[in-house]
Image: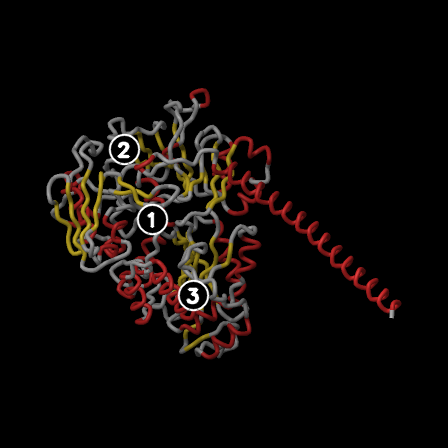
Amino acid sequence: MDRRGGVTAFFAFLFLGIVLACQVLAMLRADRLYGQLERLEQALRQTASAQMGPDKTLAGRDGFPLAPAGDEGDWLVWAFRVEPKTLNQFSAENDVYSRWITVPYIFEPLLVYDYNDLTMQPWLAESYSISEDGLEITFELRDDIHFSDGHPVTSEDVVFTYETAVNPEVGAANIANLFVDVDKAVAVDARVVKFYLKRPYFKALENVSFWDFGILPKHVYQFDDASEFNSRVSEPVGSGPFIFEKWDTGRQVVLARNENYWAARPRLKKIVYRFISNPAAAVQALRCHEVDVIIPEPDQFAELSRDEEFKKEFYCLSYRAPGTPFYYIGWNQNSRFFKDKRVRRAMTHTINREEIVLHLLKGHGQTITGPFYINGPQYDHTVQAWPYDLARAKHLLDESGWVDTDGDGVRDKNGTAFKFEFMYSADNVLYERLAKFLKDQAAQVGVELVPEPVEWSVVISRVTDRNFDAVVMGWAGDILEDAYPLWHSSQTGNRGCNYVGFSNPQADAIIEQARRTLDDGGRNELYHRLHRILHEQQPCTFLFTRPSFRLIDRRFCNVKVYNLGLGYRQWYVPRQKQRYK
């Protein structure tokens, strides 16, 4: 009895010892884990500090980043890969390059987004108010604002800007769609303007503040014939901190500082946009200090960001912001090849998106399944990408009636060979490589892809006219995403932004309901439903998203990345490092 009790006690102590040992080991592992997590967090903080800079405060009500005291003078010289077709923002042919040149450097909005917290703040407007039912938005303008020619900015200019945007004879259907929920704009007096809405709209405040486009001076732009306005592609005039100096076609656009600017003047004297289509030539121009900022190709960034000597002279910035674009192949549903969703899905199955990210983007990117910002709440991460599957692609093409009836290796239907043109900007090396990659993959399922490189200005004209079979492009998002311009059926004509001709009654109903839904959570769920419809219908093959890349001369100070991106207006160059007078 005593011996059995002793044995029992021995095993009990042994068991307790094992338990205690396990706890000690667990504590040691936990300590090591917490240490690893702490070191990782510290490294991330250091990386963020190196990229963002030590000071992220903002200049209060104006929304623009606060710049420390610095010297005046010098120029900022950009290298742009393409030359915009117009500097008229109220045109279906404006593009991101046109907008980068003009807003907010020449044209300014009523409200701006704060660069860090992304809330709207007064700018040309001193204040604003929204009625309880959300159907009236009133702006009171500042009393010290004026255009670069000295004329005061008044409510009449705001009303003129709105009426120009919605004028059906002005070639800006892509802009007019932003105001379909607005009934009218009224100048109450010289400083007060009121917008009346037909129905609540979640982006109403952003749109009627002309955040993306800025206010036009009526005395400069007023017209009797809309064709007069449409033909004005150069010499923009606004209220911003820079004025248009010249456009040397094929070479550069030059902006000079507005010495009579109503607010605090920027420290830089000029901004120059030089057009250098060859990416290697752009890097060489940067190295030779002929330009100060370039947007490199992914492989260039991957190489140069590892070059320690290069980084001593240049910032290598990689960042994401709400406007980070997604890239896609648009299948024109007016084309004889892509009317059938089975064909569009078959084409998606032929594209190995993981290989594109790995080899063409050098790992700097993510595959996507829909048109929303991948880190935003509108994106539905439950949607699984259609896989790279050549067998499935062949089956879908067979089902849709595209078969090789004459044995020449190319599928055909009703006497038409499946041989389509793949349009892309000839200035984009990534697109050129992508076209070669996709041509080889399409050939494996009996489809002939014909690369069609054209100038960027031609791409813009042809997509707005629906004159293409397939096109690869990027689309920059917004802080507040509205699916209406790209996906509502009403935008398929009159040079709207639904370039691929997507028309789906269920999608239209969701888009319209989302516009009226002021609750973010409810609207996000609606966009998840739209995401799933687009995934099923495949009007586009959504390829990837990737960070924005910038290589910047280190002579510039106050170069910081904010939640909204880079605050170029706040840069300056110390006097001893200045190059231009």
Q: Secondary structure at mark 2?
A: strand
Q: Which amino acid type is marked by label 1?
A: Asp
Local crowd at mark 1 within 10 Å, few (<14), some, or many (≥20)? some
Q: Tell me, what colour scheme is on the image?
A: secondary structure
Q: Which residue is mark 1?
A: 95
Local crowd at mark 3 within 10 Å, few (<14), some, or many (≥20)? some
Is mark 1 in CB contact (under 8 Å) with mark 2? no
Q: Say which residue appears at 49% left-offset and 40% top-offset.
A: 317
Q: Which residue is mark 2?
A: 243
Q: Which of marks 2 and 1 precedes in the sequence?
A: 1
Tag shown at residue 420: 3
Q: Which of marks 2 and 3 precedes in the sequence?
A: 2
Q: Residue placed farthest to the top in the image? A: 576
Q: Residue 524: x and y, percent?
A: 37, 61
Q: Secondary structure at mark 3?
A: strand
Tag shown at residue 402: none
Q: Residue 535: x and y, percent?
A: 43, 67
Q: Say which residue appears at 14% left-offset and 45% top-offset.
A: 223
Question: Against 173, is 565 above or below?
Answer: above
State the quadrant of the N terminus.
bottom right
Q: Residue 531: x and y, percent?
A: 40, 65
Is mark 3 in CB contact (under 8 Å) with mark 1? no
Q: Which amino acid type is marked by label 2?
A: Ile
Measured Cα–Cα span from mark 3 to mark 2 = 44 Å
